[in-house]
Amino acid sequence: MVTSDEVGAIILHALEALNEDSNPEDRIAVSLETPLFGADSGIDSLGFVSLITDVETALNVDHDLNISLADDFAVSRAQSPFATGETLRDYIMTLAAGQ
């Protein structure tokens, strides 16, 4: 079973990867408090898709956890799981508990 700390590290690594591919002036803060989606986010739509893909891939390859983060369940939640790295981590832990 994947731990909350491991999931957090995966998200942070994916945020670092986004920064590596960005111009210096477009880089974002790398923390679990970083807004991932919405008006406060510094991540564009392509970067967001890349982030989610990187996180899903790492969960699958490193932890044999095959989950889809962008699905109807995510969209139907009262609080978006994509608000911050922390809400994404918590959402992933909820999905992992169900497997």
Image (cartoon, grey):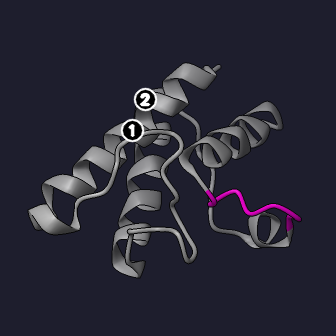
Circle 1 crowding by C-alpha within 10 Å: few under 14, some 14–19, many from 20: many
As drawn, is 55 to the left or to the right of 14? right
Number of residue marks: 2
Q: Estimate the x, y position of residue 84 in percent, counting from the top left.
A: 58, 52
Residue in front for this viewpoint, 75 or 58 = 75
- Asked if the stretch drawn in magenta spans residue 98, the answer is no
Which residue is at a point 45% across and 41% down the rendered structure image? Answer: 11
Q: Is residue 34 above or below residue 78?
A: above
Which residue is at a point 21% across and 55% down the rendered structure image? Answer: 19
Which residue is at a point 61% across and 41% down the rendered structure image? Answer: 86
Q: Which residues are magenta?
A: 77-83
Give the Cα distance between marks 1 and 2: 5 Å
The quadrant holding residue 12 is top left
Residue placed under numbered mark 2 in the picture = 9
Residue type pointed to by label 1: Leu
Q: Is residue 67 above or below residue 53?
A: above
Q: Estimate the x, y position of residue 24 in percent, counting from the top left.
A: 11, 61
